[in-house]
Image (cartoon, grey):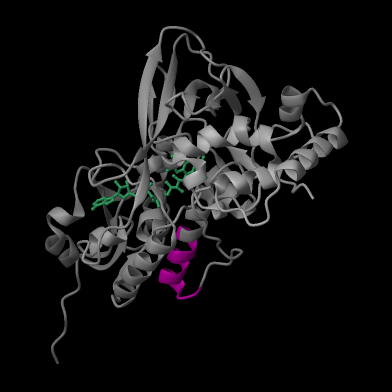
Amino acid sequence: MKTRKKKPFDFLIVGSGLYGSVIARELFNAGKRCFILEKRDHPGGNVYTENIAGIDVHRYGAHILHTDNKKVWEYVNQIAEFNRFTNSPLANYKGQIFHLPFNMNTFHAMWGVVRPQDARDIIVQQRASEYCDNPKNLTEQAVNLVGWDIFEKLIRGYTEKQWGRKCEELPPDIITRLPVRFTWDNNYFNSRYQGIPIKGYTNLIGKMLKNSEVRLSCDFFENRHYWESLAEQIIYTGPIDAYFDYVLGPLEYRSVRFETHVLNIPDFQGVAVMNFTDRETPWTRIIEHKHFNFGFQKNTVLSYEYSDEWNHGKEPFYPINDKKNTALYRQYKDLADKLDNVHFCGRLGEYCYYDMDKTIESALKKSSELLHSEPFKFNSLEKSSIPPYPVFEEQVE
Ligand code: FAD
């Protein structure tokens, strides 16, 4: 009987982002022979942090780990220590400062109210005077939900910059609910746990990958037949359409552009995240990185974020999960499902926006399936698309 020669590796992992790093750690710890290809010149994918002037800079946008999943929190904390950072971003509307998420601090700055009922009354009154039965676009929908003032100062400009279109041209279902919070709580996330790795995400990723063989600056597609010949199975975390050479056409994304500045002053804006919610300011946010770690360095590093159209050559950041792209993704998924030994994973392989905790959950679940042929026991995973705007706690009735 003819026997097939065993390939030198059990798994080839394409991409050393959070997904690839978690699964590499789990498979390696279970005794599997793995190696990782990464096309960038550094590991970590979008969670990568680089040290500039003694400050951990989130090169691909601010990353705050937040989760309700105790197992995920314990998992990352056993690998690296996390701080107690609480995300409390500010909105800057033409120099006027408002707290996010929309809460009593926001309403106080907007209308001078100090009692929750007074804020509720104003929102209900503004909604009622502008109400329209069948909102045809995002403006009508948002005004229906939170009234004119909040829409005009805190939603319109930011959303238009994010999507590159006027709110009147955006579909109403981008915002299905805009809950607001009637307490003075500025904590942006509702999650039970949140924080930032004290020595940066790159240290966290480095610890996950410490036993794995990683080839940096190495694009899978430049020599795919060779790489494929080396491993029994492939865990592919790159874009799914690229794997199939865009045979059905390209999937679409929104991209983000960052401009990073090192300033010779100890601080610039006094907060990690400031959103610029007017239409005229070209950037959407300024990130001041030292505040993620309560830094006292004599310099500061800022990243200006600009929402950007995506085309080939640009980083694909946010999948556009509209009807057209979702249908196209399903067709690619059908092709993917026909391949026994290739697993399409992570935010690019599954064409969906995953927060980091969901990425970790997903990688742990997959490794468990691969190792034991049974799912990891976590709560069911929820996919989400790009959060259109802050997600809040309470819906105004
Ligand atoms: P990636 O990080 O994209 O990793 C994929 C890797 O594959 C990349 O390194 C890429 O270079 C590599 N690759 C692709 N193609 C190839 C190829 N052909 N050959 C070799 N290598 C290849 N989540 C939170 O929980 N909190 C936040 O605050 C938060 N902020 C975010 C801000 C922004 C701007 C964005 C875009 C996302 C944010 N996220 C946040 C989500 C978080 O980034 C993801 O959950 C996580 O990065 C997904 O990891 P991944 O490994 O799936 O993807």
Report the quarter where the N terminus lies: bottom left
Q: 185 or 390: which is nearer to us?
A: 390
Figure disc tally: 0
Relative horizontal placement of residue 195, taking residue 41 as reference (left or right) = right
Q: Where is residue 188 in the image (x, y as percent from the top left)?
A: 64, 37
Rendered residue at 48%/60% (across/down): 362
Q: 66 or 165: which is nearer to us?
A: 165
Q: Quadrant of residue 98?
A: top right
Q: Is residue 368 magenta?
A: yes
Q: 239 or 292: which is nearer to us?
A: 239
User: Is the stretch drawn in magenta largely helix, strand or loop?
Assistant: helix
Q: Where is residue 113 in the image (x, y as percent from the top left)?
A: 82, 26
Relative horizontal placement of residue 11, taking residue 298 as reference (left or right) = left
Rendered residue at 32%/42% (across/down): 43
Relative horizontal placement of residue 93, taking residue 131 as reference (left or right) = left
Q: Position of residue 3 (x, y in %)?
A: 16, 84
Rendered residue at 50%/21% (across/down): 290
Q: Name above or below for residue 129 compared with residue 233.
A: above
Q: Quadrant of residue 104?
A: top right
Q: Is residue 196 visible to us here?
A: no
Q: Where is residue 237 in the image (x, y as percent from the top left)?
A: 33, 56
Magenta stretch: give its range. Answer: 363-374
